[in-house]
Amino acid sequence: MPVTGEHKERAIRLLLVDDEAGYVNVLANRLSRRGFQVRKTYGGTEAIQVLRKEDFDVGLLDLKMEDMDGIEVLKIFRKMAPEMTIIMLTGHGSERAAQEGVALGAFDYLTKPCDLEELVAKIREAYQFNKQS
């Protein structure tokens, strides 16, 4: 049943951090069509600058980026916005680093390319976790 009027929840604010511009643009478009409010950033440095000015519910953070390592970005995010839930995105073979991210406070990780429906479910799960803590 659709929710209307004052009871409608606002869109989940999502910070997408990945240095593969094509991937970011496609993923942002697909997630926006599913009702998420997506802010695209193309690296750790840009994401940190954006996070200084805007608030987000969930962050999707790539582990391997040219400008900054995803683990370093995660550590900074945890200090800047401890209330933001982080999902790490990793390529094949980087699961150990992603597990390190979870140990450092990331909510979970997914291996790229990930199934869109699985990603959407994980974002919603992370958002609910965020609201409960």
Image (cartoon, rainbow, N blue to C red):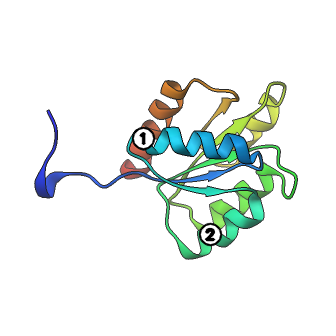
Residue at the image point whose x is 69% and y is 40% from the top: 23
| Label 1–label 2 contact, CB within 8 A | no
Q: Residues within 10 Å of mark 2 (few under 14, many from 20)?
A: some
Q: Is residue 119 above or below residue 27?
A: above
Amino acid at dot 2:
Val
Give residue 109's quadrant in the image: top right
Which is closer to the viewer, label 1 or label 2? 1
Residue at the image point whose x is 30% and y is 55% from the top: 10
Foreground pick, 98 / 35: 35
The quadrant of the rendering that contains the N terminus is: top left
Mark 1 falls on what kind of element? loop
Residue at the image point whose x is 79% and y is 57% from the top: 72
Q: Is residue 27 above or below residue 44?
A: above
Q: Percent position (x, y) of residue 8?
A: 20, 51
Q: CA distance from mark 1 to mark 2?
A: 22 Å
Q: Percent position (x, y) of residue 22?
A: 71, 43
Amino acid at dot 1:
Arg
Residue carrying label 1: 33
Which callout, 1 or 2, points at the residue further toward the start of the chain?
1
Q: Is residue 46 left or right of residue 130?
A: right
The answer to whether one can see residue 72 in this image is yes
Q: Is residue 104 left or right of residue 82?
A: right
Q: Percent position (x, y) of residue 107?
A: 57, 42
- Disc number placed over residue 50 in the picture, else none: 2
Q: Is residue 80 left or right of residue 65?
A: left
